Amino acid sequence: MEYTVGQYLATRLAQLGLNHVFAVAGDYNLTLLDEMAKVEDLEQVYCCNELNCGFAGEGYARSRVMGASVVTFSVGAFSAFNAVGGAFAENLPLLLISGAPNNNDYGSGHILHHTMGYSDYRYQLEMAKQITCEAVSIAHANEAPCLIDHAIRSALRNRKPAYIEISCNIANEPCTEPGPISSITNSLISDDESLKAAAQACLEALENAKNPVMIIGGKIRSAGCVISKKITQLGKQLGCPVATMAQAKGLFPEEEPEYVGTYWGEISSTGVEELVRNSDCRIYIGAVFNDYSTVGWECQLLDDHDIWISTHHTRIGKKEFSGVYLKDFIPVLTPLVKKNSAYLEQFRAKNHAAKTIPVAEGQAPLTTVELCRQIQGMITGDTTLYLETGDSWFHGMHFKLPNGARVESEMQWGHIGWSIPSMFGYAVSEPNRRNIIMVGDGSFQLTAQEVCQMIRRNLPVIIILINNAGYTIEVKIHDGPYNRIKNWDYAGLIDVFNAEDGKGLGIKAKNGAELEKAVQTALAHKDGPTLIEVEIDAQDCSPDLVVWGKKVAKANGRAPRRG
Ligand SMILES: Cc1ncc(Cn2nnc(CCOP(=O)(O)OP(=O)(O)O)c2C)c(N)n1
Ligand SMILES: [Mg+2]
């Protein structure tokens, strides 16, 4: 088979197991899209705009080995960059591919459309270098295979986005045939000596610990399900209490007896903050300590007794072991550790079991308590629940997840509106899961149009839209007129997106009885999305958000350092 640059790129993506690539057309990428379309098994999925296209690729990367989004130069790529920044912050391998100027124009002094209006077009590559682990520019066909492989390999090894721009007149130029994909997927291996030394140091630390506790953080998400399973085995082998940080909700099976709940400082699950604070050996795995996850820096931070295992290095007490990769370290450590379940038994004896939530009166105005009680009833082992930035984060922490259920959030980047396009990309990859989004009205207004793509592809995503008349999470941090928003008829929007042939459903629910009915309709509706717009009083929010909001406001309001 004769290969062109576009076909080489598409073949590499197909070899990695991608069946879809997200795109928005633009005259710098049309030939590239034509060439990529010639490769079987790699369907092009078109989005409404490049921000959503980037987030769709990010959502796909939450389900597959990576995601890929194709945009046009500058006017497309600049929008997509926000999603690329999010993928970087969330450790997700998204490949952003941009069309680029004709290679004859470089150095010509030509002013081109869709550029900044001067003749040096390298600014986009320089910008991409700041938000990816690798950024390459392809202006000659003979260098394409090597640069494409290098960018993809870097993204996979670093679990970070990468960037490829291809001159528009190169995409259909002939190039060599791709070799075995293993040259790209083979991962770095840990330094053997450091691996053994880290395991030994860890065992000594655990030997001396009376009350070890394992805390799982959000970096594990991008390490993939295989690692999650290995971490579960370690937790069970150790027999100690296991907590998940907010970003890692769902990354440890919650039906396991070792699971104790969410560790989120003062708003942790009952008894968990005290359990972590009183531990004499905290084993953090993939933990991310930022101002939000530490509730304004008021959480237990790393100390000399702690073990911190991250994706690329490990710190045990005062010793650093770089080049010890999580994927290698956990399987080496697990068979060596001794069970130490005394601390877990102590915790269980205090019986922190959550209280049952009573069913609200059916005609009473809907509350977040009743809403969450009903959402809990929707969650099954094949559910993926997206929690959008907002009060949804805090309610989401209290759901009990049956084994197999997944939660996705974006707590490091926190771009409101992320959940709609990211779930679109995720659902393209996983159409048969029960895909549910919990999203606020404020967030929804940023990226709502991607619901029309869910309609176009008959994806049965269930969108629980919380209409609480504004930016409640911001109100609880710091209120002002800027937190009020123009109301929409959110449920009515579905008719707009349906146009003549769509199968989306839009339902309003203002009390428990209407919500019950809407949920049953949504669960039965399989050939399109269902948006359930729930009316919630603006003052009704998670008590955890009120506590968290005050602490974050305090951290934001620290006086400037003098001198
Ligand atoms: C792109 C982007 N722009 C602004 C913000 C700041 N922000 N964070 N949360 C919000 C409000 C979220 O409001 P909703 O989605 O309605 O959520 P809740 O009312 O809290 O349920 C803003 C405006 C942000 N996080 N991301
Ligand atoms: Mg809101």
Image: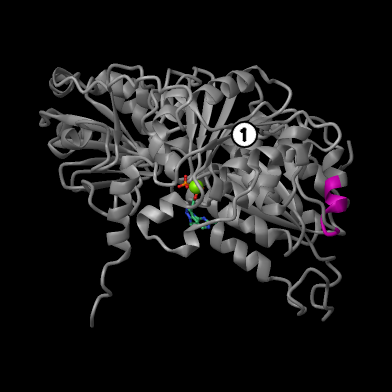
The answer to whether residue 6 is above or below residue 395 is below
Secondary structure under tag 1 reads helix
Q: Quadrant of the C terminus?
A: bottom left
Q: Is residue 515 left or right of residue 393?
A: right
Does 255 sit left or right of 415 as displayed?
Answer: left
Where residue 544 sits: x, y (%)? 31, 42
The image position of residue 143, as x and y in percent, is 75, 56
Q: Is residue 30 magenta?
A: yes
Q: Position of residue 324 (x, y in %)?
A: 36, 40
Instruction: Tell which residue pokes out farthest to the front in this image.
Output: 363
The image quadrant where one finds the N terminus is top right
Which one is in front, 33 or 174?
A: 33
- Give the class, few, some or many, for how many residues have Cα within 10 Å of label 1's Cα (few <14, many ≥20): many
- Residue bearing the label numbered 1: 426
Residue at 31%, 23% in the rendered image? 234
Q: Which residues are magenta?
A: 27-33
Location of residue 74 (image quadrant): bottom right
Q: 209 left or right of 232?
A: left
**Count of residue discs:** 1
**Along the line of sight, which residue is nearer the eye, 60 or 387?**
387
* Amino acid at circle 1: Tyr
Q: What residue do we see at 71% from left, 34% from top?
A: 454
